[in-house]
Image (cartoon, rainbow, N blue to C red):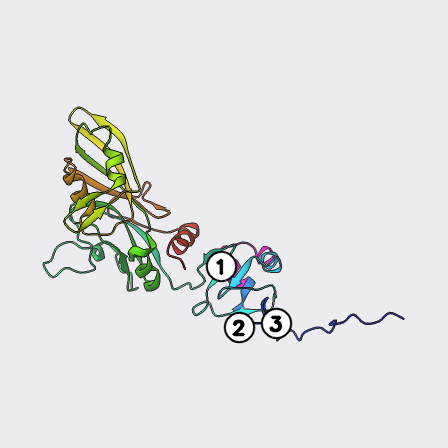
Amino acid sequence: MNQPRRGGRRRPSNQPAPAQGAETHDVHDPEGVRLQKLLASAGVGSRRACEVLISQGRVQVDGQVVRELGVRVDPVRQTVHVDGERVVLDESRVYLAFNKPLGVVSTMSDELGRESVADFLGARKERLFHVGRLDADTEGLLLLTNDGELANRLQHPSYGVPKTYVAVVPGPVARGLGRRLREGVELEDGVVKVDGFKVIDSRPGWVMVQIVLHEGRNRVVRRLLEEVGHPVESLVRTDVGPVNLGELRPGKTRPLTKAEVGGLYKAAGL
């Protein structure tokens, strides 16, 4: 006669097993939504594919692995990662790329009546934050979101999210300029070091250069290039972390892809 397997009693369907590790907290929220349904709605894959991901231990809720298909979570309160990448479950969150035109100030309103970011957002009702700033005379990529935690993290210098700029400056440039910029240049508010520098085009009298840095100080690119003898004639920010301006026209916005949002969360340590 076969003996019953130890621990073979089934768990009631309304009491999902806790995630691995007895010392961790219970992430199950009885009032929440089934995890596989949320993942499928977020575009991770079909519901069946998401069930496989959960069963394989590739999904974390609030930092702990979940393998039980019955787990329910709160998409607003709880955080979910798949293979280490943050998945945005809260459908009220907005993440936009905006190509800021020349002359537009990086504010949502301007007491002087100048054209501001809000003038390009139409009838959007969300309260959006701009991530960082661009000077009125600098154009290019500006991120907009109503995710305050992400916006604050991306602007905090300790996370070092890289930003890429393309500048046109008087040329030619000295052969050792890139090395000098990487080693650091003393400005009035401290030393600035770039993460990357290269010449991408040149004509008689001018040069187009690309600079990558994670500094967020006021007008830092302009001050840096002027200090080394190449005052900026035009400046465009093309990238913030994993987000690229691409073919987005000045004055236009586009939603960020799920991969871009996930990359921003990773860069911000969330």
Residue at 27 percent of width and 35 percent of height: 179
Residue of label 3:
16
Position of 75 compared to 45: left or right?
left
> Residue 15: x, y in percent?
62, 75
Write down the residue under mark 2.
Answer: 25
Residue at the spot of label 1: 81
Distance CA(mark 3)–CA(mark 2): 13 Å
At x 41% / y 54%, what residue is drawn?
A: 266
What's the magenta region? 37-50
- Give the quadrant of the N terminus: bottom right
Badge 1 element: strand
The quarter holding residue 68 reads: bottom right
Q: Which residue type carries mark 2? A: His
Mark 3 Cα-neighbour bin, 10 Å: few <14, some 14–19, many ≥20? some
| Residue 126 image point, x, y percent | 30, 64
- Give the Cα separation between the discs numbered 2 and 1: 17 Å
